[in-house]
Image: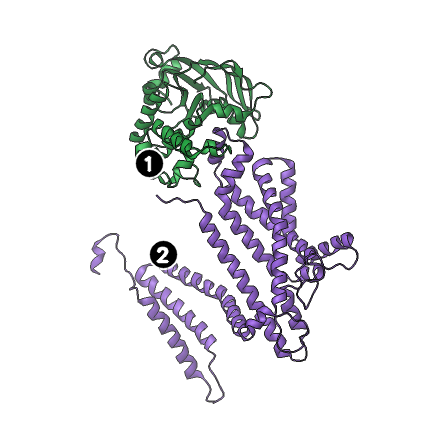
Chain colours: A purple, B green
Amino acid sequence: MGQNSNAFARGKLGSSVPSLMLVGGLALSWTLFAVSAPNDSDYEINLLVVAVVGIIFFTLGLFGLAVRVEGRRRAVDRLATILVTLAFFIALTPLISLIITVVSKGAVRFDVDFFTLSMRNVVGEGGGAAHAIIGTLIMTLAASIISVPIGLLTSIYIVEYGTGKRLTKWITFFVDVMTGIPSIVAGLFAYALFEILLGPGTRVGISGSAALAVLMIPIVVRSSEEMLRLVPNELREAAYALGVPKWLTILKVVLPTSIAGITTGIMLAIARVMGETAPLLVAAGFSNDFNFNIFEDRMQSLPNFVYYSYIAQGSIPEAYLNRAWAGALTLILIVMVLNLGARLIARTFAPKLGR
Amino acid sequence: MSKRIEIKDLNVYYSKFRAVEDVSMEIEPRSVTAFIGPSGCGKSTLIRTLNRMHEVIPGAYVEGEVLIDGDDLYAPGVDPVMVRRQIGMVFQRPNPFPTMSIRDNVIAGVKLNNRRISKSDADDLVEKSLRGANLWEEVKDRLDKPGSGISGGQQQRLCIARTIAVEPEIILMDEPCSALDPISTLAIEDLIEELKEKYTIVIVTHNMQQASRVSDRTAFFNIAGTGMPGKLIEFDDTAKIFSNPSVKATEDYVSGKFG
C-alpha cells in the first residue's frame, strides 16, 4: 500500500462499507432462511429472527474485516459502536411501541365530547373525561402549591444554612427515606390524616393533593438542592463583599442564578406525580361527575378514569376501552406539554452568556 | 473617605488549625499595602479577616483585634454586613453576577440591598463607577449586555467598578490580576494608582514586580513548614523590602532564591 510510506498511516475501511455490510448481512440471513424453509405454503419466515441473525452476521463480518484492514483497536471501536447503537434501539423499542399503541387506540375517542363531557349518566357510548382532566389539574396544582414552598425552603436550609449541622444530616436522611415511600402508603397517610381532621370515610380532592405532595416534596428538595449547590460560592462572596445580607444574597443572587434548574426539577416532579393512581384512589376516591371544589366530595383523576374504564367495563365494553385509551393519551400529552414547558422556562431563565 | 487599619495580635483559625499567628501591623489611609509570600502563608486568610469574609467558611474564627479608625471589627455586636459595606473586596477570579447586565452589575450593591434609586441617579452612579474603573469607554455602548459576556480583564474591572459604586472606605484585593494577561494587569495596576487617591488599598499578590510597582508598603509573610501557621516576617516601605530588607528570609524570597 502506497500510504504506508507515512509512519502514522493505517488502512481504513471506506465510509460506505458498514452500511453495505449491514445490507449484505441481512440479505445473507434472509437467503439462508428462505433456502432452508420447509416446502410448506403455511410456513412464514419470522422477519424478527431474520433481522437478529442478520445483525449477528453483520457484526461478526465487520469486526473480522476491520481487524484485518484497520487493526485491533479500531475493530474493537467498531464493535463497541455497534453494541451501543443496538442497546439504544432496544431501549427505544418499548417507548415507540407504547406511543404507537396509545396514539392509534386513543385517537378513536380523542374528540370534542371527550374534553367537554363528564361520565354522569353515561353507561354505554359517549361521555368524556373532562371531569377527570379537571380533577387531575386541580389536585396537581394544589399538591404543587403545598410542596414547592416546603421543598424549596428545605433545600435552601440544607445548602445555605445547615452545612455540617446534625439537623441537616437528619433532614437529608429522611428526605431519602421519603423518596422510597410507596405511593399507596402516601395515599393511606393522606386518607388517615383527613379521617382525623374531617371524620371517618372522608374522600376529598385536597386529601389526594396531600398524598401527591408527600410524594413531590422529596423530589423537589433533592433537585433544588443539587441546583443550589451548582451556584458558585464566588457569587455569594461577591454579594457579601458588597455588604448584602445573607437572605438578600439568597433571594437575589442564588435563586435567580439557579431558577432555571429549580423550575425544571419542579416541573419534572409535577409530571412524575401526575400519573399516580393508587394514592388518589385511596384519598380522593372516584367520581363520575364534575367537581371543582377541592375541599368537598370525591374528585376524579385521569389515571383513575383510565383504571375504572378498564376494570368496570359496562354494557358496551368497546366504548369503555376506547375512553380508557383516550384518557391514557391525554395524560401522556399533558405530561409531555409540562416537560416542554419546563425546557422553555429553563431556556428563558438561564443566565445569558452571549457576548 | 479612607480609613486606617490597625491589626493587633491577630490569630486566625480554621477549626483547630491555626492559619495565621500573631500578626500586628498598621496600614495608613490612602496608601497601597501589598501582602507577599509563598502559597499557604496566610495572606489571603489575613486579608479576608479585614472585612470578615473569612467567617463565610464554616469553622473559621479569629482571636485578636482589627481596628478600623479605632473601631474593633471583632467587638461584640458588630454586624459583618455593616463592616462589608465599608470595606469592599475584589476577588482572584472575576465574578460578575451572570444573571445581571453590565449596568446592573455596577449598581448591584444598591439593587441587591433593596435600596431605591432614581433612574438618573443610577445612570450617574454607573457612569461614575465605570469611569473610576477605566471601563466606561469600552462598555458604554453595551451596558445592557450580560456582565459575563466581556473579557476577563474587563470583568475584573467591572468587579472593581461594582466595589467602588458602594463607596467603601477600604478596598481589599485578593490577587486581582492572577487570572489576567499582562495588558489587563497593567490596566488594573494603573487603576490602583488612581484609586489610592481616595481609598486605603490592601492587595495580595504573588507577583513581586507587581508589589514593587503598585505598593507603598509591603508585608512579607512566610511559613516554617506545611501545617504550620503563617507569620508576618517583615513589614516596611516597599523600596526597603525590595532593596535592603532586614530579614534574611525576605531577601531570599524577593531575590528569587525560593518561593
Q: How many residues crowd around disc 1 within 10 Å: few (fewer than 14), some, or many (20 or more)?
A: some
Q: Does A188 sit above or below residue A122?
A: above
Q: Quadrant of residue A287?
A: bottom right
Residue at image location 31% in from the left, 31% down from the top: B184
What is the distance, in whole Å, between disc 1 and disc 2 at their CAs?
52 Å
Nearer to me, B257 or A262: A262
Is A37 situated left or right of A70 in this image?
right
Give the position of the C terminus of chain B as an image quadrant: top left
In this rendering, the answer to whether A355 lies above or below B254 is below
Front residue of B140 and A209: B140
Q: Secondary structure at mark 2?
A: helix
Report the quarter where the N terminus of chain B lies: top left
Q: Position of residue B189 (x, y in %)?
A: 33, 24
**Residue A272 in the figure: left or right of residue A34:** right
Give SS at disc 1: helix
| Residue A51, image x, y percentages | 44, 73
Would you identify the image quadrant in which residue B62 lies? top right
* Residue B139: mark: 1
User: Residue at left 35%, top 38%?
Assistant: B150
Residue B60: which numbered mark, if any? none
Residue B143 visible in image: yes
Residue A286 x, y percent position in the rendering? 69, 65
Rendered position, A125 above or below B131 = below
Left or right position of B1 against B194: right
Q: Amino acid at mark 2?
A: Arg
**Three-letter amino acid code at disc 1?**
Val
Q: Locate residue A103, reporting x and y percent.
A: 52, 71
Q: Residue at x 70, y 56 (%)?
A: A295
Instruction: Name the subunit of mark 2.
Output: A
Numbered label attached to residue A73:
2
The relative height of residue A305 versus residue A237 in the rendered view (above or below) is below
